Amino acid sequence: MQKSAVILAGGEGKRMKSPLPKPMNEVLGVPMLRWVINSVKRAGVDSICVVTGFKKECIEEYVQTLDFPVETVFQSERLGTGHAVMMCKDFLKNHPGDVVILCGDAPFMDSKTIEDAYLQHQDGYSATVISAILDDSTGYGRIVRNADGTLKEIVEQKDADEETLQIKEVNSGGYWFDSEDLLSVLDDIKANNSAKEYYLPDALKLLLQNGKKVGAFAASSVDTVLGANDPQQLKELEELAIQKGYTP
């Protein structure tokens, strides 16, 4: 089965106080985007598409310096993760099989997690969300499972009742999809929320409504969900990388 990757890297990250697109800010001297690309490559995925947005030329010029091909597509308006993936429809059509979709500013999403999630995904799943179990899950979308362990739904913090808020398993923002199944529901995602944005988790809802099997794979490391929204958090990522011996 052919594997491809879509990496979402359109964010500006205003709180980062940096002239660069958010994923181009560095951890250990290497852009966070490159950490993610390297993990994808190590997981055996060679067809990669990066969704650009803010200062797209920075990313376009950077990927041209790599010694392997990386496609880019431009998201002219930042209208959510679902909208970002909509920009990749031609890429998805040209790369049937399975696609992993990752955030370009989560540098510790490692290749083993990507590979292990894929092994589970191959067991008849239409989509598999990569999750993590956190001591403090505040702010994250909660993973609600059925009795058999498959995914029932992802409930965002603002929509969660008291019982759901106690759940420690959260959405990392990384997913495996069957590309054809994803394309079948992508245009049905609606922006019927207060932000008027198209959210990728809604694709999971639509697949479940269509009777498809959707799963969740819990990463062994909680660090897979970590990103940075400001210089202090970026510094904390750097300190964690040094402490744990992470390398790009």
Image (cartoon, rainbow, N blue to C red):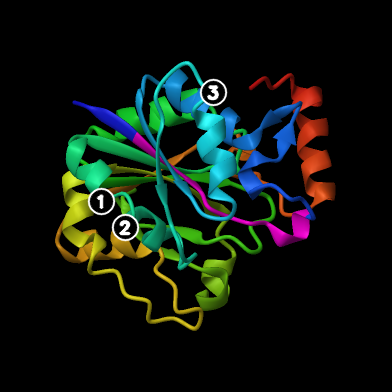
Of label 3 and label 2, which has the lower sequence position? Answer: 3
In the picture of the structure, the residue carrying the numbered disc 2 is 86
Cβ atoms under marks 1 and 2 closer than 8 Å: yes
- Under mark 2, the amino acid is Met
Estimate how packed mark 3 is, as few (under 14), some (14 to 19) or many (20 or more) residues with alpha carbons within 10 Å: few
Q: Secondary structure at mark 1?
A: helix
Numbered tag placed on residue 65 in the rendering: 3
Q: 235 or 123, which is in the foreground?
A: 235
Q: Nearer the viewer, mark 3 or mark 2?
A: 3
Q: 188 or 111, which is in the foreground?
A: 188
Say left or right for 137 vs 80: right
Q: CA distance from mark 1 to mark 2?
A: 6 Å
Judge whether residue 73 can be spotted in this image: yes
Magenta-drawn stretch contains 9: yes
Q: Nearer the viewer, mark 3 or mark 1?
A: 3
Q: Secondary structure at mark 3?
A: loop
- Under mark 1, the amino acid is Lys
Say left or right for 76 vs 241: left
- Under mark 3, the amino acid is Thr
The x and y percentages for residue 240 are: 78, 32
Magenta stretch in the rendered image: 5-16
The x and y percentages for residue 52 are: 49, 49
Q: With respect to residue 93, does 245 lie above or below? A: above
Residue at 19% x, 38% y is 94
